[in-house]
Amino acid sequence: MRAPAADKAAARDPAPPLFDKAFQRRLEELIRWRRDVRRFRPDPVAEATVAELIGIAALAPSVGNSQPWRFVTVADLGRRRRVIANFEACNKDALDDYEGEQAKLYASLKLAGLKEAPVHLAVFCDTATELGHGLGRKTMPEMLQYSVVGAITTLWLAARARGIGVGWISIVEPGEIARILDVPDAWALVAYLCVGYPEEAQLEPELQRAGWQSRVDAANFLLKR
């Protein structure tokens, strides 16, 4: 018979799972099929599912265990319209940076699913959080935002595993989005996400299929010193 103390220790420190070769292959497959989605079906995503994804995202690592991520679901149609207007203005301004055929290609790209996505999710970093007591941030304060990026990636993969697509919109003004959503001054926008069920599943990135930019072999990014 197991002693009560042993049972408590087992509950506190369960045996780690075995991530075998089959799981490793499936995980790589999940990562390969994670796409930046811009085309969504109108089907709603249940609030419980969104809450579940946020819960999983909050399991991501963070500097000093500071957990600086702050999630805002944007349901108000008036606020959504203002976000869309800001995107359209920023997108028009970005187009002016290109010329000739590249400008034509940029103008043809669908860079957001803001009008179609059933869920708008803004993700902020609380730059004033006292959680973590500043550990690991004196020399690299940007680690707070990097931690939020880790949470976003975690959410993205968890969503894809459930057949849900995510699109990350960066063509917006962070300060204006913060004003539209009326969040605390210390919250810095890291991502504005569109979430919903994709119209189609594609293995290749959309920008690669459109001829904007192909993937480069990872060996080109590796240096040895």
Image (spheres, rainbow, N blue to C red):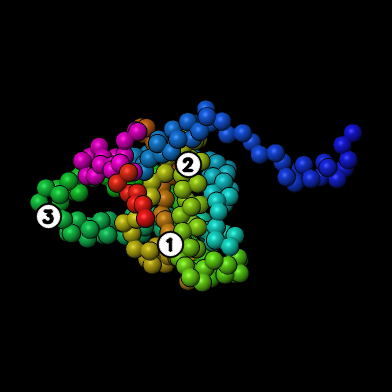
Q: Is residue 134 left or right of residue 150?
A: right
Nearer to the camera, 33 or 81? 33
Which residue is depicted at the point 15% across and 49% down?
102
Q: Which residues are the magenta region?
A: 202-218
Residue named by callout 3: 99
* Residue type (three-letter) at the residue carrying disc 3: Glu
Asked if residue 216 lies in the magenta stretch, the reply is: yes
Q: Is residue 23 left or right of residue 120?
A: right
Which residue is depicted at the point 25% across and 56% down?
91
Say above or below: 134 vs 88.
below
Nearer to the camera, 145 or 70? 145
* Residue type (three-letter) at the residue carrying disc 1: Leu
Q: Is residue 54 left or right of residue 15?
A: left
Residue named by callout 2: 157
* Mark sitting earlier along the chain (2/3): 3
> Counting other residues with Cα less than 10 Å from the Cα at mark 1, is it few (<14), some (14-19), or many (20 or more)?
many
* Mark sitting earlier along the chain (1/3): 3
